[in-house]
Image (cartoon, rainbow, N blue to C red):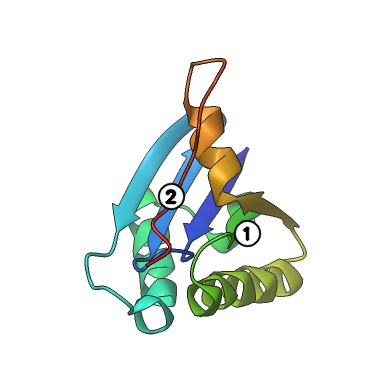
């Protein structure tokens, strides 16, 4: 099961592709506040480098916040467009929950810089 993950809720865009439980590609754009300009190019690059087509994706996950409202809209809009065009599942992920789930600790305080 191959998936595409998108996060544009902070000041940079990131894209990951996973196959089952393995992350096989990850890229974070170092250009701040360029999510709208670079996200689709990043997705295309990720698929090309992993030799995966859009049709092979089982689902798309995108960060829905909290974070930058404008940034989140960029990722959600791109993911929604792909969801409708490809007729595949779309999952919204809250950034603080993702941070907390990545921890092995039973107690965690997840915070983001609100600027």
Which residue: 36% across, 45% down? Answer: 25
Q: Residues within 10 Å of mark 1 (few under 14, many from 20)?
A: few
Which residue: 62% across, 77% down? Answer: 77
The residue at which mark 1 appears reads as 55
Position of residue 18 measured from the top left corner of the image (x, y, whole percent):
49, 40
| In-image side of 67 versus 13 (left or right) | right
Label ID, residue 34: none
Residue placed furthest toward the bottom = 37
| Residue 76 quadrant | bottom right
| In-image side of 16 versus 72 (left or right) | left
| Residue 36 quadrant | bottom left
Residue 59 visible at all: no
Position of residue 58 measured from the top left corner of the image (x, y, whole percent):
67, 48
- Mark nearest the camera among 2 and 1 is 2
Which residue: 63% across, 37% down? Answer: 1
Nearer to us in this view, 18 or 50: 18
Q: Residues within 10 Å of mark 2 (few under 14, many from 20)?
A: many
Say which label, 2 or 1, has the lower sequence index.
Answer: 2
Position of residue 29 measured from the top left corner of the image (x, y, whole percent):
27, 64
Residue placed furthest toward the left = 30
Q: Secondary structure at mark 1?
A: helix
Residue 57 visible at all: yes
The residue at which mark 2 appears reads as 16
Q: CA distance from mark 2 to mark 1?
A: 16 Å
Q: Secondary structure at mark 2?
A: strand
| Residue 20 quadrant | top right
The quarter of the image holding the C terminus is bottom left
Which residue: 34% across, 64% down? Answer: 45
- Asked if 86 appears above or below 28 in the picture, the reply is below
């Amino acid at each position: 099961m191959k998936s595409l993950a998108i996060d544009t809720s902070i000041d940079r865009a990131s894209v990951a592709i996973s196959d089952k439980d393995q992350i096989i590609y990850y890229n974070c754009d170092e250009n701040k506040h360029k999510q709208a300009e670079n996200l689709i190019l990043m997705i295309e690059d990720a698929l090309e480098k992993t030799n995966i087509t859009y049709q092979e994706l089982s689902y798309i996950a995108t960060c829905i916040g909290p974070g930058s409202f404008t940034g989140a809209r960029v990722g959600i809009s791109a993911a929604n467009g792909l969801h409708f065009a490809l007729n595949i599942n779309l999952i919204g992920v809250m950034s603080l929950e993702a941070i907390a789930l990545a921890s092995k600790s039973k107690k965690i305080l997840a915070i983001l810089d609100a600027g």
